Amino acid sequence: MLRLASAALAGTAIEFYDFFVYGTAAALVLGPLFFPSFSPLAGTLAAFATFGVGFLARPLGSAVFGHIGDRYGRRPVLLGSLLLTGLATVAVGCVPSFASIGVAAPLLLVLLRFLQGFGLGGEWGGAVLLTAEHAPEGRRGLWSSFPQIGPAVGFLAANGLMLVLSGSLTDAQFAAWGWRVPFWAAGLLALAGLWLRRSVEETPEFRALAETGRRAEAPLSEVVRHHWRLLLLTGGALAVAYAVFYVVTTWALAYATTTLRVDRTVMLACVMVAVLVMGAATPVMAVLGDRWGRRPLCLAGCAASLLWMVPFVALLRTADPVLMTLGCTVALLGMVAMFAVVGAYLPELYAPRIRCTGAAVGYNLGGVLGGALTPVAATALADGSGPPWGVAAYLTAIALVSLGCFALLPETNPAVAGPRDGGGGPARTEMGAAEAAAPV
């Protein structure tokens, strides 16, 4: 399990490195380089709009790679998604600026960002199923949290490299070529990830499906027809986790450096401390999920996010590094209470024959609802000289929606699920009944 979980963690860390390095570049330099005719605010909005394209591509990637995972195995998903995302990220670092090739520059940026998101949409489903379908039942949450640590590791690697480059280069050097270095480094990371995953074994549950001929012929069609309500609920439930994470790691970085005039190395350091704490807390929250259930942790994290958004904006507004770090850290701790357990929670909601598609599409739908437009919306709401209370209101509204969705989802942990939830496994609710009626 440790070898499998390490391979899953390494892959998600590399793929999220690819995804996050774009977000940091969008916050710091992409606006002036690729949208120079815009005002500073409009340039940042345009850069964040290309950032959002990656989220729109993620459900498409999860549908395609989910089909591969449910029809041909989880292992091909792990290799194909990593290769696609790595190649797209390296290519972003090679795109000439607007000054060199004109409007073709932002168009190429959008295309490559789409391919990044497409690959990442497939990565998550393959990685969590690698651990969830190998793990013993009582420790499924813990082992499935390893891929969930990957985003924190990827973010720290991406922003750590950006921090070193930002601190060691002049502004002119960083804008000319320094920001490209982390994108080029993605090629070496992708090769390392492929080497780590080359000997990963197929999961026992998929092997059993293949041997008995019970694989789904059209998993996406089956999920949409029989489990559309579950897809919408999981997407809505996870929206707040995405919104909080990208407000802290992307919008706050841009807001602090442009509006509050905080040095970018200082703000990067504040955010990195918060993400480091989040990564360390992930397995702890997962163990609590194994002990007390997935749903209670998700409800608690959602409630914490709901209550913390106003204090978060107030602390960010101070421009004090210690207070900004505190605000970001508490926000991410509320988010990770949900994020740590979904690696086990979402796969447990679906039968093995459609699990790769259902879990991945639901997870990435949350990214569209909560992550795609949040940096754009937050930047627009924060326009002006006053405190950005509109951002707090926006996040609070998303948290309310997510809290309602989590309240409608069942518990899946067999150790704590009662008769109402079907005793664990696919729940005996409307979506659970459809799951039971479908061939498994």
Image: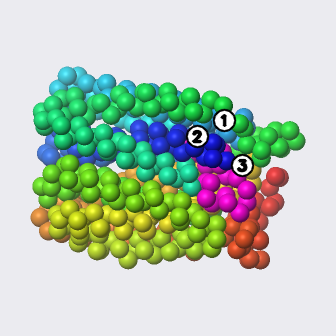
Pointer 1: what residue? 200
Residue shown at 77%/71% (left/top)?
A: 423
Dot 3 crowding, Cα within 10 Å, few <14, some 14–19, many 20+: many
**35 vs 318, nearest the viewer:** 318
Q: Residue 134 carries which label?
A: 3
Q: Which residue lies furthest to the top in this view?
A: 100
**Residue segment shown in magenta:** 122-144
Q: Distance between the residues labelled 3 and 2?
A: 13 Å
Q: What secondary structure prevails in the magenta region?
A: helix
Q: How far apart are marks 2 and 1 (CA)?
A: 8 Å
**362 vs 93, nearest the viewer:** 93
Dot 2 crowding, Cα within 10 Å, few <14, some 14–19, many 20+: many
User: Disc 1 vs disc 3: Cβ atoms closer than 8 Å?
Assistant: no
Q: Which amino acid does label 1 sit on?
A: Val
Q: Distance between the residues labelled 1 and 3?
A: 11 Å
Pointer 2: what residue? 7
> Where's residue 171, x and y in %?
13, 37
Is 350 left, or right, of 369 in this rendering?
A: right
**421 vs 166, nearest the viewer:** 166
Q: What residue type is labelled 2?
A: Ala
Q: In this view, does 304 lie above or below 221?
A: below
